[in-house]
Amino acid sequence: MRTPSSWSVAVRRPDGGVSCVSNPVTSPASRRRWLRLPVIRGVVALGESLAIGFRALAISASVASIEEGDDGQPTGEITRGQMIFAFAVAIGFTVIVFKVSPAILTELLPIHNTILFVLVEGVIRVSLLIGYLYVIGLIPDLNRVFQYHAAEHKAINAYEDGAELTPERVQTYSKIHLRCGTAFLLWVMVIAVFVFALVGRPAWPVLIASRVLLLPVIAGLAYELIRFGARHPDNPIVRKLLAPGLWLQSLTTREPTLDQVEVSINALRDVLAAEERSQAERGVSRVEVMA
């Protein structure tokens, strides 16, 4: 779970208990005003989310292997070298599978119209995303991850509704949430169609380069759309625009167990406590939480 200035991870220990670890969010955007500009802030937020995700996985792994410090808290963290390697693999996989390969596949088709080329490429890209999410959801371990994903959404929905944070009460809430990263992924694919249409159909080297180099711009635009939608959830036009992203969450969430919901509640309470401590001088009584 993440708030503006803190993040927390809760992990079920082998002995049945729950370990919680919270850390401050050290964002470069807090020190450089230009990093908070529209579109640019989306790229920064994406990088921060990836970094936090890798660190959370390292903590989770340390708990699973029963590596604990003297205070009973997990000690596992990810080194800078490991972080760079993980980033390279993740970004490389994303670019090759979802950016470069659709352009290569479309290039092999007998399509001569530029607009049709971009549209077909977009359909292939979205199809690859949906197929990928469906296939990995069949893997038991990742299916369990999707259950925890839904548990996070339920806890945040219950918190934002002011409900009591008990597993039984939280379980009654929706596993869908507007600020989910799944919707972000879909909009990256859709916005890419419009951005690449401006590029046209240049020579092969430029075509591939554009799919790689324009990814930060596309990610920034998708972030702004999700951010706008989260602030206008009751607007009927906005809800229709965001509906496909919400539907896609059915592939990345599974109904969680009460034990999993309990873990998500622990993470939520821990990050709220951390946020309250770090933001006490601002008098913040309610904060936005992201899974």
Image: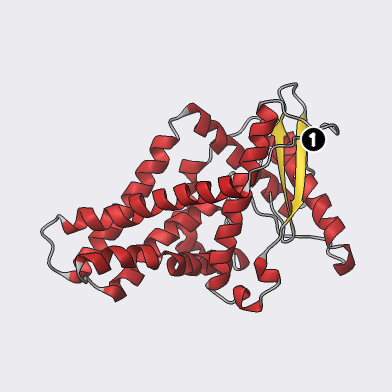
Say if 191 sits above or below 257 in the image. Answer: below
Residue that badge 1 annotates: 73
Residue 254 percent across, percent down from the top left: 54, 36
Taking depth in this image into account, of 145 and 47 the one nearest to the observer is 47
Any part of residue 125 in sight = yes
Residue plotted at (79% across, 52% down): 272
Q: From the viewer's perspective, is 113 left or right of 38?
A: left
The relative height of residue 36 versus residue 25 in the rendered view (above or below) is below
**Between 101 and 152, which is closer to the camera in this rendering?**
101
- In the image, residue 33 lies at what x, y percent? 66, 78
Q: Residue at x 49, y 47 (%)?
A: 249
Q: Position of residue 276 (x, y in %)?
A: 84, 57
Count the numbered circles shown.
1
Does residue 229 show up? no
Looking at the picture, the colour scheme in use is secondary structure
Q: Is residue 132 left or right of residue 84?
A: left
For this view, does 128 lie left or right of residue 289? Answer: left
Q: Where is residue 137 shown, x and y percent of the image?
A: 45, 35
Front-most of residues 52 and 106: 52
Residue depicted at 60% across the width and 68% down the height: 232
Helix, strand or loop at mark 1? loop
- Packing grade of label 1 (10 A; few <14, some 14-19, many >=20) is some
Please, which residue is most extreme toward the front here? 81
